[in-house]
Image (spheres, rainbow, N blue to C red):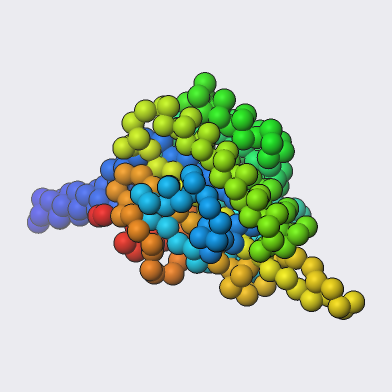
């Protein structure tokens, strides 16, 4: 009898181990992941102006011009969602409440540090709060905070010389121009073209690392923008509401396992985190609410 109990116990342990192994990390799809953040890029705007590099990228990418921003559709809440896989109602990150350790929704940088400690990670941001609020202080990565004009060539140099496994870059110029001139202004489109031009250099640097079939590239914007009437009869250009012009963000991914084409199912920008994790074969933390969009990967 005792032996039977012991055997039953061992079978249970073995079954538990098997199911644990099954639920653990998946096979990595990519060796390297690059995430390009374009602040304030209205999703549909990528089809409203000629963008040689982004539009060529879209031909081989799964993409959406209606990836949903967060409520509110503002930078801090939205970048928090992109990195942490949950909406601002859960991550609650702001300047008085920067990302902390010990929560169930760590940033994907933190998750990579933990599960792939040897991976070289770089985060170059033209918007400082990503470095000081969005990412946990305990994250380990090479960082640069600089203007758009400085950060683009610095990123190219960093990719060529340091060959990062995971790299995130954030551009501010599109949103800054939207605020100043409007999110459908000629200046706005010129700013997108300016970023597009630098993406050409970034893509060339990434391709220079070789193994394009093992490289995932994700482009994501945090929100769009629109005109709001002012009390004096004028308008201001901003974002923050649930209007589609604010909510529809650009999201695209190209790389191993991706099914190219326009994505029909609606999803939020917080799905960026689980897509990064899936690309690297890392099991997403239980606290991430966002999932990999259905149909994104061939599996
Ligand atoms: Zn923003």
| Horizontal side of residue 291 vs 108, given as left or right | left
Is residue 123 positioned above or below 26 on the image? above
Is residue 153 positioned above or below 287 on the image? above
Image spot of residue 204 (x, y percent): 47, 32
Residue 232 seen anywhere in this rendered image of the structure: yes
Image spot of residue 205 (x, y percent): 48, 30
Quarter of the image with the N terminus is: bottom left
Is residue 103 positioned above or below 147 on the image? below
Which of these two is toward me, 149 or 267? 149
| Horizontal side of residue 292 vs 66, given as left or right | left
Residue at image x 38%, y 38%? Answer: 215
| Horizontal side of residue 97 vs 268, given as left or right | right
- The residue lying furthest to the right in this view is 232
Residue 62 lies in quadrant: bottom left
Residue at image x 41%, y 31%? Answer: 207
Image spot of residue 250 (x, y percent): 52, 58
Quarter of the image with the C terminus is: bottom left
Residue at image x 47%, y 26%? Answer: 163
- The residue lying furthest to the top in this view is 161
Is residue 43 positioned above or below 213 on the image? below
Which of these two is toward me, 262 or 223? 262
Residue at image x 65%, y 35%? Answer: 151
Image spot of residue 256 (x, y percent): 31, 44
Residue 86 seen anywhere in this rendered image of the structure: no
Q: How many marks?
A: 0
Residue 32 lies in quadrant: top left
């Amino acid at each position: 009898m005792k032996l039977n109990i012991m055997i039953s116990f061992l079978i249970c342990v073995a079954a538990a181990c098997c199911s644990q192994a099954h639920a653990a990390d998946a096979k990595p799809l990519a060796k390297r992941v690059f995430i390009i953040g374009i602040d304030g890029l209205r999703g549909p705007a990528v089809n409203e102006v000629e963008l040689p590099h982004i539009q060529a990228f879209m031909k081989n990418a799964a993409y959406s011009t209606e990836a949903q921003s967060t409520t509110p559709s503002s930078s801090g809440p939205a970048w928090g969602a992109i990195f942490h896989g949950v909406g601002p109602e859960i991550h609650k990150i702001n300047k008085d409440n920067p990302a902390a350790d010990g929560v169930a929704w760590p940033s994907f940088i933190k998750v990579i540090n933990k599960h792939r400690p040897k991976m070289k990670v770089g985060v170059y941001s033209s918007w400082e709060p990503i470095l000081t609020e969005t990412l946990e202080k305990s994250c380990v990565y090479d960082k640069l905070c600089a203007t758009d004009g400085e950060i683009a060539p610095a990123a190219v140099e960093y990719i060529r010389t340091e060959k990062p496994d995971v790299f995130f870059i954030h551009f501010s110029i599109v949103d800054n121009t939207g605020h100043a001139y409007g999110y459908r202004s000629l200046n706005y489109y010129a700013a997108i073209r300016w970023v597009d031009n630098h993406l050409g250099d970034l893509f060339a640097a990434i391709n220079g690392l070789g193994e394009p079939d093992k490289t995932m590239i994700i482009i994501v914007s945090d929100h769009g923008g629109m005109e709001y009437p002012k009390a004096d009869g004028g308008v201001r250009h901003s974002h923050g509401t649930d209007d589609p012009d604010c909510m529809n963000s650009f999201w695209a991914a190209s790389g191993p396992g991706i099914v190219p084409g326009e994505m029909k199912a609606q999803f939020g920008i917080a799905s960026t985190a689980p897509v990064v994790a899936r690309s690297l074969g890392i099991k997403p933390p239980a606290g991430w609410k966002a999932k990999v969009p259905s149909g994104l990967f061939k599996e």
